[in-house]
Amino acid sequence: MPSVVGLLEQQELAARRRVDGLREEADRIQAELAAAEQEWQEWAIARRRVDTVLAPDGDSTAEAEVTEDPRDADAQSAPRDAAKPKSQVPVWREGLAWSVLSVDYQRILKALADRARLHQGPLTCQEMAAEFGMDVVPARVEALRSKAKRLVARGWLAEQQPGRFTLAAGVAGPGGGS
């Protein structure tokens, strides 16, 4: 039979390990928070600079919208600051390369270009999800549908039947875009 002191020492050791693990996690989160705040400040500075350059008569409207402390920023400004490079989908035009698109959009175009090359016809978002190795669940399928619809709206894809996507006329292989 174990002694009471031995049991207490085991419990103390388990508690100490938990405290140490939580401290490490807290340190990691603090470092991640500091990096996120730094990134937010860099985006805020960039937005102010762009606003200064583009504002007529040197008036700046961004200063009223941007706060110095990210914790004071209101929730409505967060989505604008969250834009990532290549997340915008430009309107397709002759000669525009696929490289202007993010990897996710290029992946959709490549799948449809392969289908067109093999004369296999349109592709649904469920088929795309399966082809990309994703779980074919509503959230994944709807995310792909949103991207495909955005590509249709910008002229990269065509949707001749609802939910069935092909490359738009004139859009070709990934190298040149036309």
Image: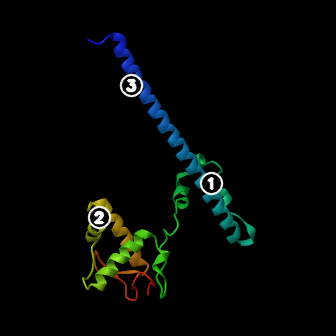
Write down the residue under mark 2.
Answer: 133
Label 3 near label 2: C-beta < 8 Å? no
Whole-percent x, y for residue 26 in the image: 50, 37
Q: In this view, does 169 lie to the left or right of 162?
A: right
Question: Residue 46 appears in which quarter of the rendering?
Answer: bottom right
The image shows residue 36, relative to residue 164, as above or below, that is: above
Write down the residue under mark 3.
Answer: 14
Q: Between 18 and 38, which is closer to the camera in this rendering? A: 18
Label drawn at residue 41? 1
Nearer the camera: disc 3 or disc 1:
3
Whole-percent x, y for residue 108 in the image: 36, 73
Q: How far apart are marks 3 and 1 (CA)?
A: 41 Å
* N-term mark: 1 or 2: 1
Q: In this view, does 170 lie to the left or right of 130?
A: right
Whole-percent x, y for residue 130 in the image: 26, 67
Give neighbour class at mark 1: few <14, some 14-19, many 20+ (Cα, 10 Å).
Answer: some
Q: What residue type is labelled 1?
A: Gln
State whether residue 159 appears in this view.
Answer: no
Q: Is mark 3 on a helix, strand or loop?
A: helix
Residue at the image point whose x is 42% and y is 29% from the top: 18
Q: Distance between the residues labelled 2 and 3?
A: 41 Å
